[in-house]
Image: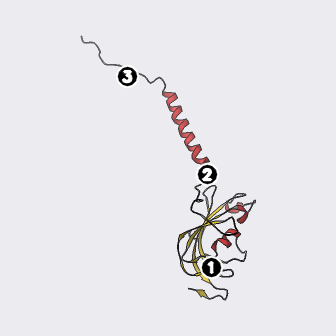
């Protein structure tokens, strides 16, 4: 008779510890990803004189500029910088462009000052610290935490001068 020459597959003695190590590595990676700060745009943002809000022009516009007292219509998307969570967008279903009076305090300071000087068609990012946004209390109804820094992308759709006529 012939001897059974089949070899036995060696057992992996540390299978459980290998699984645990893989799980620990995955857990650490997820923890680090969650703990990482939201992407910073600080390197491309420009100061707005006299304010902590900063801005970045994404697309140049043309024509008249937003001035104090003008009625401005915009598309806007706002996110909380710390979490990256969108809290509002005029581009979402059921929303419409937002209209406000520029430079007179009808909106948060960072937005009010950050849009002055924009032109029709211009798209700009604004990074608005809490003290020029919703402050230490935040705006919980919109998911803006206490002390939340805001990040807006704003596009100027139209500008009406102080007399109400469309500026082109």
The C terminus: image quadrant: bottom right
Earlier in the chain: of badge 1 and badge 3, it is 3
**1 displayed left or right of 30:** left
For label 2, the crowd category at 10 Å Cα-Cα, with few meaning under 14, some 14 to 19 and many 20 or more, is few
> Could you tell me residue 22's position as x and y percent?
51, 35
**22 displayed left or right of 50:** left
Tell me what residue is drawn at x 62 percent, y 55 percent: 83
- Looking at the image, what colour scheme do you see? secondary structure
Earlier in the chain: of badge 1 and badge 2, it is 2
For label 3, the crowd category at 10 Å Cα-Cα, with few meaning under 14, some 14 to 19 and many 20 or more, is few
Q: What whole-number distance in Å separates the C-alpha atoms at marks 1 and 2? A: 33 Å
Q: Is residue 85 visible?
A: yes
Secondary structure type for disc 1? loop
Mark seen at residue 9: 3
> Could you tell me residue 70's position as x and y percent?
66, 82
- Snapshot quadrant of residue 166: bottom right
Secondary structure type for disc 2? loop
Residue matched to label 1: 66
- Snapshot quadrant of residue 40: bottom right
Name, please, the residue furthest toward the left.
1
For label 1, the crowd category at 10 Å Cα-Cα, with few meaning under 14, some 14 to 19 and many 20 or more, is many
Earlier in the chain: of badge 2 and badge 3, it is 3
Residue matched to label 2: 37
Tell me what residue is drawn at x 69 percent, y 82 percent: 69
Q: What whole-number distance in Å separates the C-alpha atoms at marks 2 and 3? A: 48 Å
């Amino acid at each position: 008779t012939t001897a059974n020459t089949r070899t036995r597959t060696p057992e992996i003695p540390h299978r459980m510890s290998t699984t645990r190590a893989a799980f620990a590595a995955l857990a650490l990676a997820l923890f680090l990803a969650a703990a990482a700060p939201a992407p910073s745009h600080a390197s491309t943002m420009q100061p707005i004189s006299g304010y902590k809000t900063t801005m970045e022009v994404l697309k140049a516009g043309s024509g008249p500029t937003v001035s104090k007292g003008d009625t401005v219509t915009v598309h806007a998307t706002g996110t909380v910088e710390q979490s990256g969570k969108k809290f509002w967008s005029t581009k979402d279903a059921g929303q419409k462009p937002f209209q406000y009076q520029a430079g007179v305090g009808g909106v948060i300071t960072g937005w009010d000052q950050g849009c002055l000087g924009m032109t029709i068609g211009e798209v700009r990012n604004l990074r608005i610290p809490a003290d020029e946004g919703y402050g230490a209390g935040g705006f919980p109804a919109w998911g803006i935490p206490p002390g939340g820094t805001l990040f807006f992308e704003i596009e100027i759709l139209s500008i009406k001068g102080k007399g109400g006529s469309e500026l082109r």
